[in-house]
Structures are given as structure tokens and as C-alpha cells.
Amino acid sequence: MKRKFLSILSVILLLCQFPCCVLAAEENAAKIRSGYWADDVLYTFVNFPQEEPEKLEVSLFVNNHQQGRGAKPELFSSTGATVHYMLLVDTSSSMSELAYLLSAFAKSLLEYGSNLDISIAATGSDFHVVGTDLTSWDDVHSALRRLNYLGGSDICGGTAKALEYLGGKNYRAGDVCSLVVITDGEPWYSNTPSVELEREEQAAKAAAAMIDAYPEIIVNTLCFRNWEENAFAVLSTGSGLHLSANAVSDVSNLGKALSDYMGSLYTVVFPLKGYEGIATINDSVQLFAENSWLSLGRIRNLNMQPAMDAGDEIVLPPVDGSEESPTQGTESTEPAIEAAMPAEAETDSAVKDHASPLMVGTVAAIAAVVVVALAIVGILAKKKKAEEFSIRMRAEILCGKAVKKKEIYHLTNELLIGTGKQCDIVIQDPDAAPVNTRIFKQGQMIYIEDMGSPQGTVLNGMRIFSSNRLRSEDEISIGSTVFRFLF
């Protein structure tokens, strides 16, 4: 009990170093953040946990067949490519008093970033762009001052429209596009509950479809208050950072954190032949580096519009921003911005005057409680998200032994099986490969494929050589290990 208490105390003290600031925890594993192809060249942008990733050799596999030679990762910032940011601002009336935090974040992003340009867009009653190709603080600040914080907000619907807008832009091959959704977390459409519910469901569906349709765009979020559950569940599926803060110092740190995050990307480039004339690749496309398999999922051809099924085309009903919210005013926000954001010299003086030891201690104590509470809320939100946007599967080992296994899995993307510790199910079998088998979800269907292992994967008594549909109670054999999933 004493050891457990000390462990908890250590975590709280560590979190106190970052008051009121929460960054989504990143797993210590390589992750593909963005990927697309253009003119027969595949561009992938990866975070590597290893030291000196430039020394790695990364191989490209399509349908379990290696394509050509391996490639060396190159630090994105050394390629001379550009990061194109769009700051998508929730312009509901409740955001007007937080405009100074938005300005601090944008200024920090420009200060710490390099080779970037910024666009500013609003998502209130509708989506519209107020400034593009901004590279200086004066230009960004001028665009931010043109935002009108009035009426309702449309976080998910605005995100869907922003992704569609960015997907239609012609960026140079090798560049990266990053969308930052900035909000106080509360969508508001009208004073009619039935309209709100229908609008929210359709907007969430549209945002999820667009995040999937435009994999080259890294979707980040920044919340100044508390997220509405459904909106966060959808937008946090984006491949970027999901940040939260409510003080100027925290927001400035988050601007640096996002710049560092983008600066840590490595570009890995491969020639890609045989896919001319199609908008997206539906084959299994993976990277292999140092015993790790990375799946790209959907990959879009930047020379073509994404192939959307007719069923995915969603017409969003208009946001009713004409009715005044009972708790939110609709007055003009130009004076509010000026009042909320004092001159820099005055801000610095105020910070110095109030930075007494007692104040610092109080803030640190409050921060510890807030951060722990937010962490618990985050864990619960992730658990709820996993249950809502995944397929629940129960694993049963019929023969053999697994050293790392859960009984219940929530399949959101993929599940790896093999002898390597990076797998979700680690089996003890001398005939199995480190990453032997992959189970993955496409839409509401589950598929299984062998990862090119020497002994292969057997499904219902037959060895498989390509992706196969997996059904509940199908029997899977890897060497002498036999198991099944029920879903």
C-alpha cells in the first residue's frame, strides 16, 4: 500500500510541472501520421521512437509482397518541405472571451515552427476561410481579428468542410497539411433539442468519413474548456495531437509542443507503380522497419479526388444560429478581443506582480488536482470511444499458450498476433513469426491476413495467402497454437 501511494504521489508531482495542460499520451512505437501518393511516388510521414532513424531501412509491402528496395527515413525539417496549418476556430459566442488564448497559441506556433504557412478558418453557423498563406504574426493577428464570435457552433460539421477544402488544395508533393480544430468543446446548434440531436449525429458521421477520406491531413485538436463527448470521440481519431489548456503559459507551451511534434516527423518515400487512374488504394499497404509493421490504411492519390461511396455523401442541415442561447450573448466581439488580450508589457508586469511563492504553490496544488481529474476523464472517454467506434471481440485459446492476451478486445484498427512483444496477442510457439498475423477492420467487416510468415496462418483448416473475411467462431491456427474470436 505504501509503495502504491508513493507511486501515485510521484505521478502527481510530475504532472505538476505542467499545470492545467494535458497532452494525449503517445505510445512508444513508430506511427504513420500521414500518407499519400502523387505521380507514382508514395510519401509517408512517420514518428520513430528509435534513436537515429536515418540508419533504419524501411521496406514497402503491398499485399504481403515487398516492393523494390528499402528506403531511408529523412527528417522532415531537413527536406525543405512546408507544413501547411489550418487553424479551424469555433466561433460560437462562448469562445469570444477565450480569443486571447487562441492568439497566444498562434503566436507560439509561428515562433517555434519553421517552413510553415497558416490559414485561418471559422466554424460557427457556417464554414468560411478568413485568411490563407499567412507567414507573419501581423498577418495572422489581422486574420484572427476578423473572426466574429456570434451564435452557434458546428465543430464536427465544420471539420468535415475544412477537410474537404484542404483536400482540394494543390500542395507541393512532400509537404504536410495539418488541421488544428480549436474550440471550447461545446457544440451548439439551436434551442430545439430534436434538431440538435439529428444535426450532431449527421455532423459526427460527416467528420468521421472525411478524416478517413483524407489521410494526408493530420487532424489535431485544442480545447480550452471541456469537450463534448461525441465530438471528441470522432475528432480524436485524427492522427495528430489532442491538447487541452486554459492559461496563456499553457497555450504557448502547446504551440511549441505541436511544432516539435511536426518537426519530429520523418519522410519515407517509395516509388509506387500500377495504380494510375484510381483515387485510393484498397490493397494492404504496409511499411516494415526493425521488426515493426506499420499499416497505412486508406491512401489517397493527390492527383484525384477521393472515391466516396454514395452512401457516404452527407448533406448537413443548416445550423440555426438565429436563436440566442440562454447562456450566451451575441454581441460583437472586437472590443472583447481587445479587453481580453492586453498589451504584452502589461501582461508581463501582471505575471511578475502575482508570482509570489504562495500563489505558485496554490496554482501547483490546484493544477495537480485538475490534471489528475482530466486524466481520469480522458481514460473514461477513451474507453467509451473504443466501445462506440469499434467491434467487440472475445478471444478463446483452444490449443497452445499466449503470454500476453486479454479476453476482450475492442477492434478499432488492427490487432497483431505473433511472438514479438509489440503484438496484441503474444504466443509461445517456435513456428510463429514475431509478427505473424494481422486482424483488421474495414467498415463493419473484419479481415485476417498472414504477414509473410514462414509457417503461415491457417483459417478453418486452409492456409491463407491474402486477406480473408473473418467470421465469429472461425478457427485460426498459427503453428501449434489454435484460437478463435467471438463477436
Image (cartoon, rainbow, N blue to C red):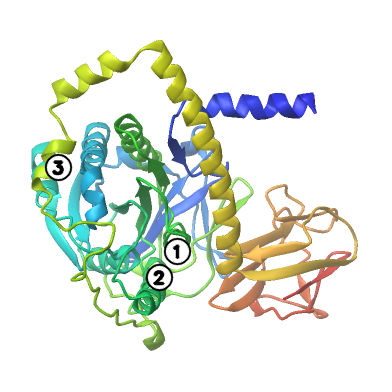
Find the distance from the CA under tag 3 to the CA under tag 2.
Answer: 30 Å
Going by the picture, which residue comes out furthest to the front? 326
- Amino acid type at image mark 2: Ala
Q: Residue 429: image x %, image y %? A: 85, 56
The answer to whether marks 2 and 1 mark residues whose Cβ atoms lie closer than 8 Å is yes
Q: Quadrant of the C terminus?
A: bottom right
Q: Work out whether 435 lies above or below 190.
A: above
Going from the N terminus, do you reach mark 3 or mark 2 first? 2
The residue positioned 23% from the left and 40% from the top of the image is 106
In the picture of the structure, the residue carrying the numbered disc 1 is 234
- Amino acid type at image mark 3: Ile
Closer to us: 96 or 16: 96
Q: Residue 394: image x %, image y %? A: 76, 68
Question: Residue 326, can we see it?
Answer: yes
Task: Decide if residue 92 is on the left or right side of residue 144.
Answer: right
Find the distance from the CA under tag 2 to the CA under tag 1.
Answer: 6 Å
Going from the N terminus, do you reach mark 3 or mark 1 first? 1
Q: Residue 337: image x %, image y %? A: 14, 42
Task: Assign a secondary structure to mark 2.
Answer: helix
Find the distance from the CA under tag 3 to the CA under tag 1.
Answer: 30 Å
Going by the picture, which residue comes out furthest to the right? 399
- Amino acid type at image mark 1: Val
In the picture of the structure, the residue carrying the numbered disc 2 is 204
Q: Work out whether 438 lies above or below 287.
A: below
Task: Assign a secondary structure to mark 3.
Answer: helix
The number of discs equals 3
